[in-house]
Image: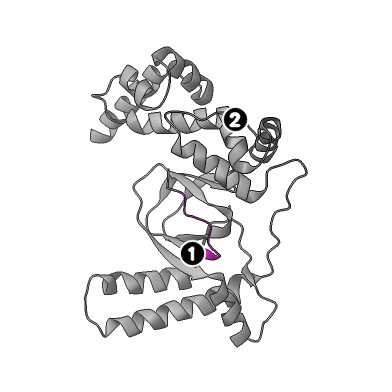
Amino acid sequence: MTSPMGNDDAYLVCLNLRKQSTHELWCDGRSVCSTSYEGGTIYVLDLRRDPIAYIGDPLHSLYFYLPRQAVVEASEELGKKSIVDLAVQPDECFLDTIVGSIGQTLLPIFNTAAPANQALVDHLLQGLCVYMTSTYGGSQKRPDIVRGALAPWQQRLATQILRERLIDGVSINELAEACGLSAGALARGFKKSIGVSPHQWLLSRRVDLALDLMADTDVSLAEIAFNAGFSDQSHFSRVFTQKMGVAPGAWRKSLANNRRVEAA
């Protein structure tokens, strides 16, 4: 899982230099994409929507930070003052040879320390900004807040607190107080916004952590259960089986078999 990226009025234009066979993305606490990404493709993250990703493969990517104000200024230079956003949905991943070429041009520059290269980098990034604005710019409609659901800032705060208290857990009353709601309103709003209760969301994140820990075959399932925040191995096994459809021991055995096949 990536760390929270903050709430910034900007975009990340992500160039995948290597295929990602497992990639799940959450925005405003809601899952918006679960797919594989081919090498050479791009996707765009709106940092106003608190994007968080689970990436199951080694990551090799370039991330271009693009303030929304830069998009607005570029649109004015292009004579298109109606452009205020990049109108790319977070579940869109596609091939763009221009962005790919800019990324491949930058890679060898990053390996040298020549001061003269900074001017080239600046021009390339300015060109990327103009290109993204002219090609993907628009007036993107932000998702409407569903009646009875949490506001985006409440979703971000609640899920951030849950992640920070992943092991120890946190009570509904604490979450509600932080979000300025009653316990009942928080519970109902969280489920309407994200689709599951805060407790079930927390359990899913503990399972995600357990999956990472299970890669170390020297660590017992009992230790993994403890380190992932479960009360005991039995509790861990029940939740894992419910979420993944297979018991932890069978999952680990399958993982070991796959590694032996790859090694062969």
29 is higher (above) or lower (below) than 198: below
Q: Of the two numbered discs 2 and 1 on the same chain, state the one appearing first in sequence.
A: 1
The residue at the point 58 percent across, 36 percent down is 175
SS under mark 1: strand
Instruction: Indicate yes or no whether the magenta region holds residue 193.
Output: no
Quadrant location of the C terminus? top left
Q: Is residue 177 visible?
A: yes
* Dot 1 amino acid type: Val
Determine which of the numbered discs, if any, sits on residue 172 in the image: 2
Residue 76 location, quadrant? bottom right
98 is higher (above) or lower (below) than 26: below
The residue at the point 70 percent across, 54 percent down is 143
**Where does the image place residue 60, in percent across and percent down from the top left?**
35, 55
Q: Which residue is mark 1?
A: 13
The magenta segment: 4-11
32 is higher (above) or lower (below) than 192: below
